[in-house]
Structure formats: C-alpha cells, structure tokens
Image (cartoon, rainbow, N blue to C red):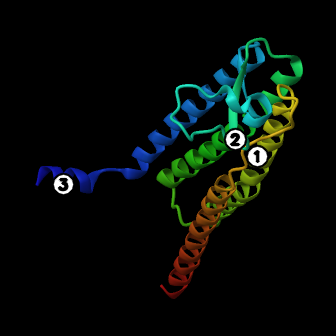
Amino acid sequence: MKARESLRRADWLRELHGLLLVAVVVSGVVGVVGMIATLTGQPVDIEAPSGGVLRPDSLVNARAGAVIDADASIYLRVEQPSGVQIGLATVAALPTYILATTMLVMLWRLVGEARRTDPFTAATARRLRTLGWLLIVGGPVAWLVEFLARFALSGTVATGGHQATLNLGVPAVWFLAGFGILAISEVVRRGQALRAELDEVV
C-alpha cells in the first residue's frame, strides 16, 4: 500500500523536468567534447567504399566462398587530418547535436512552465507547435547536411569515388517525433478552448 500511495503522490512532471535537465547537460557536454576533439586534430574516421580501397584478394581468415562486397563501406582512420577533413568532420556531426540539444532545452522549459502554471494555455500550444515544426524541418535538414559532409569527406581519402551511407530511417524518425509534438500541441489547444467554454458557462 505504501508503494502504491507513493506512486500516486509522485510528481512525474518534476521527475521529467530533472531527467530533461540531465539530458541537456549530457548532450551539450558530448557535443562540445566531440567538437573539441575534432578541431584539435584528433584522428578522424572517414567512411570510404571498400571496392575503391581494397583488392578482391585482400580478405584473410575467411571461409571459402566469402568475398569482399565492393559496394559496402569501411572506415579509414586518418591520424593527422587536414584542415578540410577537420571542417567536413565537424559539419558531419555538429547539426544533430545542435538540434537535439535545442529540442531538449525547449522541452525542459515547457515542462518547467507546466509545473508552475496551468499547462493548458495558448502559449504552451504555440511553443509545442514551434518545437514540432523545428523537428519536422530541422531534422531532415541536419541529416542531409551531415550526409553531404560525409560524402565529400570520403573523397579526401579514396580515389575511387565518393560514398556515404544514406539512412532514410533518420529523417523518418524526426518526422514522426515532430508530428507527435504537433498532435500534443493540438490536444493542449483543444483543452484550453474547452476550458474557456466551460468558464463562460459557469
């Protein structure tokens, strides 16, 4: 009974607010540390087409019948990257960190305001719509920019052509998250409108 009563008294908005703060800090620290490591000339792993950098007979410790897939990608480590490689490697990772951190900050502020005031307000619905459209537009844009940077980066280590993995699931996830936030904003807007109608009746 005590455990059940404790769950009933739990302030889940407070818990979520705290978790979002931790996520903001972690996302920001990981992004900053990663960018510092790249900009200070740390080794860079670059995707390249295996068919352009490996001979068909270079496979070892494999059973008979196994061959190298010429269309697959491998990662080559550049111990002393050039300025161009450092710049492209930065662009290939930075947009997602910026977008994710911005999203977490906006959610953290929204949850904090919902704890202090009535969450069913026009301002809350408007902020949720802003966040939803940010994910719908910003997510695919960040994904495309990073893909183009990785594509250009592969040409700096391989002479056989450019290659980068095109993961279409990434923009799909951003679209889904964005439309989910827009749906929540509509629920909040309708709740606010319903409350206004009830206040008029009373």
Q: What element does badge 1 sit on?
A: helix
Is 137 above or below relative to 66? Answer: below
Callout 2–callout 1 Cβ contact below 8 Å: yes
Is 1 above or below relative to 59? Answer: below
Q: Which of 84 and 70 is in front in this view?
A: 70
Callout 3–callout 2 Cβ contact below 8 Å: no
Q: Is 193 situated left or right of 17 in this image?
A: right
What residue appears at the point 88 percent right and 29 percent down from the top-left corner? 159
The numbered mark, 2 or 1, whose residue comes first in the sequence reads 2
Q: Which of 60 and 158 is in front in this view?
A: 60
- How far apart marks 2 and 1 lie (CA) works out to 6 Å
What residue appears at the point 62 percent right and 38 percent down from the top-left corner? 67
The residue carrying mark 3 is 5
Residue 154 in which image quadrant: top right
User: Where residue 18 appears, x then y in whole percent?
Assistant: 45, 39
Depth-wise, is mark 1 or mark 3 nearer the camera?
1
- How far apart marks 3 and 2 lie (CA) works out to 41 Å
Q: Which of 110 and 140 is in front in this view?
A: 140
Is 132 above or below relative to 116? Answer: below
User: Where residue 151 appears, x then y in whole percent?
Assistant: 82, 39
User: Mark 1 is on which residue type?
Assistant: Ala
Q: What element does badge 2 sit on?
A: helix
What residue appears at the point 71 percent right and 14 percent down from the top-left corner? 42
Q: Residue 96 carries which label?
A: 2
Q: Nearer the viewer, residue 176 or 54?
A: 54
Residue 182 in which image quadrant: bottom right
Q: What element does badge 3 sit on?
A: helix
Q: Residue 179 carries which label?
A: none
Q: Which mark is residue 142?
A: 1
The numbered mark, 1 or 3, whose residue comes first in the sequence reads 3
Q: Is 76 situated left or right of 84 in this image?
A: left
